[in-house]
Amino acid sequence: MKRYSARKLISCVAVAAGLGLAAISTEAHAATLRMAWSQDATGLDPHKQTAFSSIRLLELIYEPLVRLDSNLQIVPAIAESWQFSSDGKELTFKLNPNAQFQNGAAVTSADVKASFQRILDQATGAAARANFLSIASIDTPDATTVIFHLSQPDVPILTSMTSLNAAVVPASEITAGSIGTKAIGSGPFKLDNWVPNSKEVLSANKAWAGGTVGVDGIDISVLPDETAILASLRTGQIDFALLNDPLVATLVPKEPKLQLTRTPVLSYNVLQLNPSHKPMDQLAVRQAISCAIDRKDVLDTAALGEGKVTGPLTMPLYATDPSQLFCYKRDVEKAKKLMADAGFANGFSATVIAATGEPPTATAEAQVIQSQLAEIGIKLDIKVMELNVYVDAWLKGNFDMAVALNGGSADPYSMYNRYWTKTGNLQKVANYIDDTLDSLMQKGRVETDPAKRKVIFAEFEKHIAEVSPWIWLYTSYGYTAEQKNVQGFVPTPTGSLFGLSKVSIK
């Protein structure tokens, strides 16, 4: 750990004050990682959170049964092993006998059962409920064995269980009704203090069954201006930062004392149309919007070209070349004809919502789209909202259009069934379903042959791009910046910060 002279430390604090940053204690423990990010969590209930900022915090505190590694392979978390039955209708987990919650209680099969019962309870409002509807019953023959009995073979359920939204929480806290009011997980860090929109203080969970945590804790400052985060990195006031803005991230390599980690991610930037609002209920209007948008221009203008144009499926194993999808080459004349065919030759007015800071490119994306749609007569009003207000409106489907950054998954079904199946619990967000989408999702769910699954989901991708309920734009990168004495962080395509559990400061 690098140490500072008193004079230099005072100077750094003075710089922080001048920038309006939260002052950092000069007595911080040498093994504490000083971190910053621009967006704070919006809540502490792991089963309900959809905002990236919440997930990034909670995945340091809670654990699912299994997780994805940097190669998108499923690896142990709370469970040390698992096995499907030959007919694919039973999934058995053996739990790590050393796993325990941060209150000292052992993680048992009863906690797993209670967690999934809570996720499946419609009253919970769990974000990933639709991924687990094949669970017919759960047996717990002993404290470290959990058997999920499925109503049908469900190939992607294991991938779904890697999500933070499938975290195992204490059954006692469910009974007490305290999930979301405090955070007690089994992960590498404990949440000691949370001052919303200001800071989080985490300490290492010395009893974590996953191994030794590399630092004593993490002090996180919430600094909404990422240029201020970069300034704080430059002056050595923070050790590690999560960056979302490519305009800031691309400046990091110019700093000799800093290093940038830049990782392609599965999350995607998208213009969500709301087909329950007129005139987006008309196929020709949605297709016209798709044909009018120059996705590459959105990427280049809003994100400095930091990414690539994408279709709906972002995982390499299943992704289709976007040039093969409907209207991925901009065609304004075709868009105008589609508008005229739908009876809107003179256009219409609509509102697009965007969140401040998540992603930081959202407003710029909305402005580029506003300009492009104006060419076919669509007058777009941009409404920028604070993140928590945006999330509330988004979950209620209370928008004409929405610029969004949505999470990806290693499996197409896990990624999209909550939106594009008839039982999807985020149907209110998508507001569109047809028999073809639902049928293809169900076929992909039960098919075990990898080659056949690729064919099914290629058809799904082609169809959803053509009916255009959303206009997929691009995938980008996950960025972290750190001092060069911060070592051991391993990023993943999911954008997870779980790798902080193995970080050390030299």
Image (cartoon, rainbow, N blue to C red):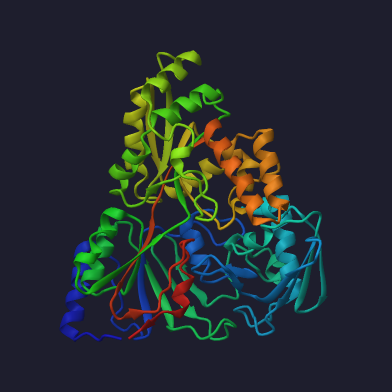
Q: Residue at x 49, y 60 (%)?
A: 54
Q: Is residue 272 visible?
A: yes
Q: Is residue 403 visible?
A: no
Query: Where, by quadrant of the figure, is residue 282 drawn?
Result: top right
* Whether residue 203 is situated above or below residue 467 in the rendered picture: below
Across and down, in percent, residue 307 comes to 36, 51
Relative to 386, 284 lies left or right: right
Q: Residue at x 64, y 35 (%)?
A: 433
- Residue located farthest toward the front when viewing the structure as drawn: 451
* Whether residue 359 is situated above or below residue 68 in the rendered picture: above
Pick the front one: 21 or 436? 436
Q: Residue at x 80, y 60 (%)?
A: 89
Pick the front one: 11 or 236? 236
Across and down, in percent, residue 33 comes to 37, 78
Quadrant of the rendering where the C terminus is positioned: bottom left
* Whether residue 329 is situated above or below residue 390 in the rendered picture: above
* Whether residue 108 is situated above or below residue 68 in the rendered picture: below
Query: Where, by quadrant of the figure, is residue 234 drawn?
Result: bottom left
Relative to 185, 370 lies left or right: left
Quadrant of the rendering where the N terminus is positioned: bottom left
Q: How many marks?
A: 0
Across and down, in percent, residue 291 comes to 42, 29
Across and down, in percent, residue 225 comes to 29, 56
Relative to 312, 262 lies left or right: left
Relative to 350, 186 lies left or right: right
Pick the front one: 242 or 445? 445
Pick the front one: 182 or 220? 220
